Amino acid sequence: MPDRYDLIVIGAGPGGAATAFYAARSGLSTLVLDRQTFPRDKPCGDGLMPHAAEEIRLMGLGDWLDEPRHGRFSGFSMYTDTAAFRQNVPPTLHGPHGYVARREETDEKLAERAKESGAELREGLRATRLLRSSAGAVEGVVAENGEGELRFEAPLVVAADGIGGFAGEGMKVHQDAVARRQYFKNVDGPNKENLQVFITRDMNEDHAGYGWVFYLGDGTANVGAGVSTKALAKTGRNLKDFYDRFLEEPRMKAWLENAEPEGPAKSWSLKMGMWGAKRYGRGIMTVGDAGSMIHPISGEGVGYAIESGRLAASWAHEAHARNDFSASTLSGYEKQLKSQRAKEHVSGHALVNLVPNLHMLEPVFKACETNEDARRTLIAGFTGDEPIYHMLKHPKALAAAAKKIVRDKVG
Ligand SMILES: Cc1cc2nc3c(=O)[nH]c(=O)nc-3n(C[C@H](O)[C@H](O)[C@H](O)COP(=O)(O)OP(=O)(O)OC[C@H]3O[C@@H](n4cnc5c(N)ncnc54)[C@H](O)[C@@H]3O)c2cc1C
């Protein structure tokens, strides 16, 4: 007899762990399957914006977050082709700090919290297909562990498999960016209390991308770069090439002069901006990267994976209370998620995809050097705390930028 649950969650990354944590805490018998075994690495910048830190605190990990081996940042240093400026974390209800914590540890902690709240985690099991009745109702999933197939029953499934490709059924969207990161010891540089963001000419002349140095608290730094898949297509270059050239930028070269790499660089794909993804259907919801919940400007997705997991868990609870797993009931999850996040994600997606390349925005970055209000809004657009169209509130900065663009065009 297959095991029977109220909810099966595919994937125990931040999205799946949060879904399972909240679902089990609300009383649902919850099974989480992950094809890997924890602790496991996930290529990431390890940056946790204040809203993401808040989600982690809500899961009972506030003291862990404050442990000194993690980085704790209070601002941003931004370097572009023509501009350089610093800005504190914009004031929000989430507090004045974000964190930098290795995903290997963060994800293990989150998965532990899911287990502590009563969820059952089964590792080394890859979900391969959704089971549906002849009438279309979800009945469970099939998984395999290398030795054979196992069946688990539930009327409801949450796909939290990142870019894993489990959900199928037209729920998946294509990746729209790729990123690569490596840890280094002894990275030099000023203002280590800031996240360091580099909008280089090389990554932005043919669409969009950025490089970063995120300092941890243990003497290491996470150094990475990410570019849109459009940038790859337009240039015919690969991600490694963009990353290697980033490390050769003069400022980076100086900062890395005495640095030692810790392990190899690792790459992964991103699906961003909520765009085009289907996040619910009869008996199924998707959360985190599986639902394209990465912020399209910053590439940040841990906080959104947890938030979407928290909301999906409350809709799983609601569906059980109504004994109704229809798409119409689960559309409540999508509506709630959109009302919380669509403004920021979809406007960021529009900016990145409508502007032919981010290098065009250099005059805006230049104006931000001296216009503090515009700078704060730009950074709030990056942290996901404000939609990027709030830049329209700064006509002076935009007018200066427009003038510069026209002057350059006219010669
Ligand atoms: C290089 C890089 C840098 C990034 N930097 C940041 C950053 O600084 N800050 C930030 O917030 N975000 C960042 N992101 C994005 C962030 O990593 C993701 O948004 C985040 O991992 C999403 O969590 P998730 O739970 O949705 O998916 P994942 O973390 O990918 O977890 C998915 C889980 O599902 C499991 N799985 C997959 N398929 C199956 C299957 N068929 N059966 C069972 N299990 C399965 C996997 O083993 C995995 O454990 C970065 C991404 C990249 C690539």
Image (spheres, rainbow, N blue to C red):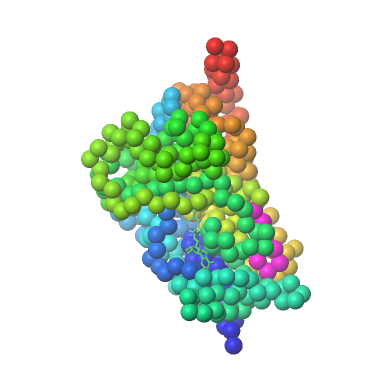
Q: Residue at x 70, y 70 (%)?
A: 325
Q: Is residue 7 visible?
A: no
Q: Residue at x 59, y 75 (%)?
A: 142
Residue 16 spot, x, y in % from top left: 52, 64
Residue 244 spot, x, y in % from top left: 37, 40
Locate residue 24 relative to residue 224 in the image: left or right.
right
- Seen from the viewer's position, the closer of residues 210 and 25 is 210
- Seen from the viewer's position, the closer of residues 322 and 247 is 247
What span is colored magenta in the figure? Answer: 277-284
Residue sticking out furthest to the front: 236
Please, is residue 302 above or below residue 370 in the view? Answer: below
Locate residue 378 relative to residue 46 in the image: left or right.
right
**Residue 157 found in image quarter:** bottom right
Q: Residue at x 57, y 16 (%)?
A: 409
- Seen from the viewer's position, the closer of residues 255 and 191 is 255
Quadrant in which the C terminus is drawn: top right
Count of numbered marks: 0
Quadrant in which the N terminus is drawn: bottom right
Q: Is residue 153 visible?
A: yes
Residue 216 spot, x, y in % from top left: 33, 49
- Seen from the viewer's position, the closer of residues 37 and 267 is 267
**Residue 37 found in image quarter:** bottom left
* In the image, residue 281 lies in the stretch drawn in magenta: yes
Q: Main secondary structure of the magenta part?
A: loop
Residue sticking out furthest to the bottom: 1
**Residue 188 found in image quarter:** top left
Q: Residue at x 28, y 42 (%)?
A: 187
Locate residue 389 relative to residue 303 in the image: left or right.
right
* In the image, residue 16 lies in the stretch drawn in magenta: no
Residue sticking out furthest to the right: 135
Residue sticking out furthest to the left: 258
Residue 169 spot, x, y in % from top left: 67, 63
